[in-house]
Image (spheres, rainbow, N blue to C red):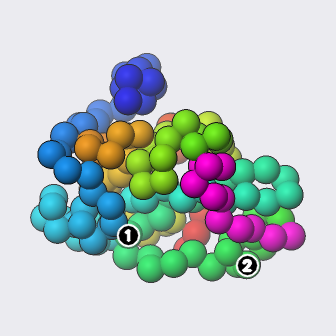
């Protein structure tokens, strides 16, 4: 989380890191815990293609990602979900704790922009990052958007 804080401070991004006693495992758990709309939760998923790995930051209201459609958006032949081992190898984080700032090409769900703040991973299971959705573009190499 120190690296994430450093990046946020260097890029002059307003943020809040909220610590909680137990890990939040799902978007619904996050929405319930913080008293926010499900859509404000922003899980980061890692997918792989022949071309390499990508991060997808979705709105928690999106129940699933259509990997075929996302592959078309990216111009890839196919996307699959990365395994837990692959997620840790390419991000340094465990599944469910991937930070909202990753060093992978990133796809962002446009639905997140309808909220003043979104809540996502810090790299640690017992804390959550609260930021403006506009900060995602400063934190990541955004290559595409999901509608």
The residue that appears at 44% across and 43% down in the rendered structure is 99
Mark 1 to mark 2 CA distance (whole Å): 19 Å
Q: What kind of element bears circle 1?
A: loop
List x then y, in percent, for residue 126. Answer: 26, 44
Please check the rendered image and state whether residue 47 is part of the magenta-colored stretch, yes or no.
no
Task: Out of 44 and 106, give the one closest to the viewer.
Answer: 44
The x and y percentages for residue 80 are: 71, 68
* Secondary element type, mark 2: helix
Residue 60, numbered label: 1
Give the vertical position of 50 relative to 32 (above or below).
Answer: above
Q: Residues within 10 Å of mark 1 (few under 14, many from 20)?
A: many
Label whose residue precedes the other's in the sequence (1 or 2): 1
Magenta residues, start to end: 77-87
Place residue 29 in its image quadrant.
Answer: bottom left
The residue tagged 2 is 68
Quadrant of image for the C terminus: bottom right
How many numbered tags mark residues here? 2
The quadrant the N terminus occupies is top left
Examine the rendering and report whether any part of residue 108 can be seen: no
Name the quadrant containing residue 112: bottom left
Q: Which mark is residue 24?
A: none
* Left or right of 3, for residue 104: right
What residue sits 16% from the left and 59% below the top? 34
User: Is residue 115 shown left or right of residue 57?
Assistant: left
Q: Nearer the viewer, residue 137 or 101?
A: 101
Instruction: State yes or no: residue 79 in magenta.
Output: yes
Evaluate whether residue 129 shows in this view: yes
């Amino acid at each position: 989380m120190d690296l994430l804080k450093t990046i946020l401070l260097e890029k002059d991004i307003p943020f809040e890191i909220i610590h909680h006693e137990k890990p939040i495992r799902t978007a619904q758990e996050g929405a319930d815990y913080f008293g926010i709309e499900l859509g404000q939760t922003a899980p980061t998923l890692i997918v792989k293609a022949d071309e390499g790995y990508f991060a997808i930051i979705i709105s928690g209201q999106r129940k699933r990602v259509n990997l075929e459609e996302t592959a078309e958006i990216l111009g890839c032949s196919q996307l699959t979900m990365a395994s837990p081992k692959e997620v840790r190898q390419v991000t340094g984080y465990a599944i469910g704790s991937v930070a909202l700032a990753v060093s992978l090409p990133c796809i962002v769900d446009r639905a997140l922009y309808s909220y003043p703040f979104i809540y996502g991973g810090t790299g640690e299971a017992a804390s959550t990052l609260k930021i403006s959705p506009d900060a995602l573009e400063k934190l990541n190499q955004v290559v595409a958007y999901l509608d």
